[in-house]
Image (spheres, grey):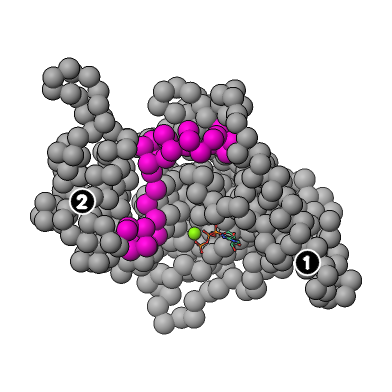
Amino acid sequence: MINMEKAKQKKGYLSRQEEKQIAKDSKRQVRILEKEKKRKKTLDEYTSVMQDENNLVEFDNLNTNFFTERGVVKAVNGVNFSIKKGATVGIVGESGCGKSVTAMSLMRLIQGPMGQIVDGAIRYNSRSGVVYDMAKMPMKEVYKIRGKEISMIFQEPMTSLNPVVRIGNQLDEVSKIHLKSICPKTGEEIPMTKEDAKARSIDMLGKVGIPAPAHVYSRFPHELSGGMRQRVMISMALLCDPSLIIADEPTTALDVTVQAQILELLATIRAQFGGSIMLITHDLGVIAEMTDYVIIMYAGRIIEEGTVDEIFYNPMHPYTIALHKSKPTISSEGKRLFNIPGNVPNPINMPSHCFFRSRCSHKCERGATEYPDLVQISETQKVACFRACPGSVEKKEQKLETTIEPIEETIETTATIDEAPKTTTEIEPIAIETAEKSKESITVETPKKKPATKKPATAKTTVTKKPAARKPKETE
Ligand SMILES: Nc1ncnc2c1ncn2[C@@H]1O[C@H](COP(=O)(O)OP(=O)(O)OP(=O)(O)O)[C@@H](O)[C@H]1O
Ligand code: SF4
Ligand SMILES: [Mg+2]
């Protein structure tokens, strides 16, 4: 098999012959994977055991690739995280980092035959108590879960709804496939009747705040506004009382006032339906308002994860810190907005070292040769950066309570970090310096939680602490 990276490095381009060889290799791999997907499997092969019974979903080393004619796109590259029962998990990252592909892998909606889950497991704790590995499950079994126990709200409702079918028929179809009615004569469960399905659809349209739901029931999608269509999508997702709702940028295609209404609706749903939500968004304000746990993705990998407080008040990865800095605030009005310089590396030709290095404002030597593993730095927070290590948080906090070193001095310390990356002092320069620099842009108007009561000895101590934006309306 041709190694595209080596071939390109040799002469700076790929010959037609090499391109043909790459396309041939891709096709061969797809054939093997498709054959495996279609193979008849026994129940044992696609059932599993949860690592933690409190989890609803566990992604375990998920690898999803697209086999293109130019090479293999590693869209999701060894992703591990879990969604607890009843929790809202936010997934953040810039365009193309693999958020949607992660969600689609769970729903088994990856565009085949080019797109394939090549490795890993996605354990789903179903209502029946059986733990399914969604990555290996036959499609026939997936249909029983998809739409019923796990449903999805897509970014653009106009492209998700069928434009030539009335809203009501599209909603009824879901109920008829997944729900049951009770036969009045025998008392037995039968597939949901037309009348029951209609009553349920109208009821659900009313619950998501659609005025005159019976009227909207008989309309076509193009007759509704964007916000109404997204409400219809949400009502469709809720029809079967799912255990998990995946919302893939549910407000991106809407204008800001409608965005606020849809977010309010999602917050109400979250409080009422008691299931879990996986919320994919670019908007840190939405994350702050809606989620309990946050996953930050970059170039197909998780680079940081933690509770919403940890990610907002104690971000560790230079990318997370830069994301906070790039968020517009009222105080940044009229000023030039911060943007992260450079681009995400080419997904076909990923480097073997830290993916973020070319854009990192704190780049380290070690990052030039190795990819940092995700390291646990507190009970709930993990970060993939050589400048973060266990114990550094406590150390930083202790230090802030006592002496505050000038920024310049701490920056100098970073020079030694590459040589001794495991020491507990190494995270300090990033956190202190960056928070100080970005204080203006990430300090926000009315944070939900107050900063910890650490009285700074000098202006520098203000740092650290609690930069969060918790008001999506202001940020939008
Ligand atoms: N059908 C496809 N064929 C080839 N590559 C694909 C395909 N779908 C997605 N990809 C690649 O997979 C990577 C991840 O895409 P994904 O859609 O998950 O990004 P995302 O984080 O959801 O971005 P966005 O915020 O723009 O929706 C990208 O590099 C993209 O180019
Ligand atoms: S590992 Fe090094 S180069 Fe990579 S993000 Fe961390 S500090 Fe930057
Ligand atoms: Mg996406």
Residue at the disc numbered 2? 168
Classify mark 1: helix, strand or loop.
Answer: helix
Q: Is residue 271 above or below residue 355?
A: above
* Ligand 1 position by quadrant: bottom right
Mark 1 neighbour density, 10 Å: few (under 14) some (14–19) many (20 or more)? some
The residue under the point 51% across, 26% down is 131
Q: Nearer the viewer, mark 1 or mark 2?
A: 1
Quarter of the image for residue 359 reads bottom right
Q: Amino acid at mark 2?
A: Gly
Q: Amino acid at mark 1?
A: Lys
Q: Nearer the viewer, residue 72 or 288?
A: 72
The residue labelled by disc 1 is 20
Residue 44, horizontal then vertical, whole percent = 59, 23
The residue segment tinted magenta is 133-162
**Residue found at the very far right of the displayed protein:** 10
189 sits left or right of 315 in the view: left
Circle 2 Cα neighbour tier, 10 Å, few/some/many (<14 / 14–19 / ≥20)? many
Q: Position of residue 281 (x, y in %)?
A: 45, 57
How many numbered circles are shown? Answer: 2
Compared to 204, does 348 lie above or below?
below
Residue for point 67% across, 61% down: 68
Side of 118 relative to 156 (left or right): right
Give x and y (percent) for residue 6.
86, 64
Q: Position of residue 312 (x, y in %)?
A: 49, 53
Residue drawn at x 42%, y 35% as measured from the top left? 145
Image quarter in which the C terminus is found: bottom left
Taking the image as shown, residue 3 lies to the left or right of residue 202, namely: right
The label number, if any, that marks residue 322 in the structure image: none
